[in-house]
């Protein structure tokens, strides 16, 4: 059987090959090459798609330590676990189920007293795509052309894709108060909008790094619990992370 591939179909196929190659950081070789307007055997086309499917499967098996919040539209953006101190454990979660102990995408737990299974400091983080906000950015021609907006002389993020951020945190199941605030100078621009739902990937990465520093997740000797954590959107659109009622707990070595 031969297939007559139109120029548009061939272009779509080639773009798909390029997309997957770029997304997974290596060139994906397909066994068969076609030229526009030439007949192609269905078996050869299937072989090419099988090669792409295998490349995708191979990617996930080679990079189990990556969480892709939005691989379809932002395939080069992924999160990994930070360097963790000896008593910290971490787990990335892409899939959710009704009986899971946590539905957060990034989960961290410190069993600071190995002799007491209930003695834990935990925090979980969600980073999820915000498709409605991304669509609104996508509809603006200056964002599509890569030109950022400017507000009061400050250049805003030019990237289109937007993400929401959320977290929980507890010590021995006493939960922290998590709040999101903004500089008063941004009230006219943002109003009641939940800014933590329209973050760029760069803001997410910086915010997470500051959060890890606050809770000292790389420290092998102490674990930090904060009774309250505040994320504030500053006048220059940077996000500051501050904890209050924070205490350090010395961790027992396993």
Image (tube, rainbow, N blue to C red):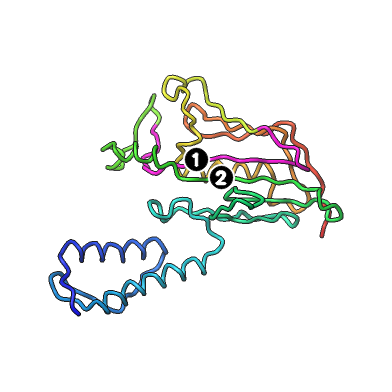
Tell me, yes or no, whether the highlighted magenta stretch contains residue 34.
no
Q: Locate residue 147: give its quadrant.
A: top left
Q: Earlier in the sequence, mark 1 or mark 2?
A: 2
The residue identified by callout 2 is 126
- Magenta stretch? 155-177
Image location (x, y in percent) of residue 141: 26, 38
Report the residue at 20% width, 66% height from top. 10
Q: Is residue 160 above or below residue 89?
A: above
> Which labelled disc corresponds to residue 114?
none
In this image, 146 relative to 70: left or right?
Answer: left
Task: Say which element carries label 2.
Answer: strand
Q: Residue at x 67, y 51 (%)?
A: 101
Q: Quadrant of the C terminus?
A: bottom right
Determine the residue located farthest toward the front in the rendered image: 98
Q: Dot 2: within a 10 Å radius of its alpha carbon, few (fewer than 14), some, or many (20 or more) residues?
A: some
In the picture shown, does residue 46 fall above or below 198? below
Q: How many marks?
A: 2
- Callout 1 environment at 10 Å: few (<14), some (14 to 19), or many (20+)? many
| Cβ atoms at labels 1 and 2 below 8 Å apart | yes
Q: Quadrant of residue 36?
A: bottom left
Label 1, label 2: how far apart the Cα atoms are: 8 Å
Question: Left or right of 100: which side holds 74?
Answer: left
| Residue at the spot 51% in from the left edge and 43% down from the top edge | 204
* Residue 108, x across and y down, in percent: 67, 51
Q: Which residue is mark 1?
A: 164
**In the image, residue 33 lies at what x, y percent?**
24, 76
């Amino acid at each position: 059987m031969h297939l007559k591939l139109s120029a548009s179909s061939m272009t779509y196929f080639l773009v798909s090959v390029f997309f997957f190659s770029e997304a997974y950081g290596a060139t994906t070789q397909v066994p068969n090459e076609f030229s526009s307007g030439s007949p192609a055997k269905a078996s050869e086309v299937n072989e090419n798609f099988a090669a792409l499917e295998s490349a995708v499967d191979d990617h996930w098996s080679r990079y189990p330590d990556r969480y892709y919040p939005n691989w379809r539209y932002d395939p080069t953006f992924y999160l990994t676990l930070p360097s963790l101190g000896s008593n910290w454990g971490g787990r990335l979660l892409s899939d959710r189920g009704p009986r899971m102990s946590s539905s957060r995408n990034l989960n961290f737990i410190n069993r600071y007293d190995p002799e007491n299974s209930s003695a834990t400091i935990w925090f979980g983080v969600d980073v999820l795509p915000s498709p409605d906000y991304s669509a609104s950015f996508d509809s603006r021609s200056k964002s599509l052309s890569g030109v950022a907006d400017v507000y009061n002389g400050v250049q805003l993020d030019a990237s289109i894709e937007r993400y929401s951020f959320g977290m929980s945190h507890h010590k021995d199941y006493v939960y922290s108060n998590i709040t999101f605030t903004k500089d008063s100078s941004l009230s006219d621009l943002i109003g009641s909008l939940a800014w933590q739902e329209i973050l760029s990937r760069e803001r997410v990465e910086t915010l997470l790094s500051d959060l890890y520093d606050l809770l000292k997740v790389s420290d092998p000797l102490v674990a930090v619990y904060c009774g309250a954590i505040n994320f504030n959107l500053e006048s220059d659109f940077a996000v500051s992370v501050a904890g209050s009622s924070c205490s350090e707990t010395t961790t027992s070595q396993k």
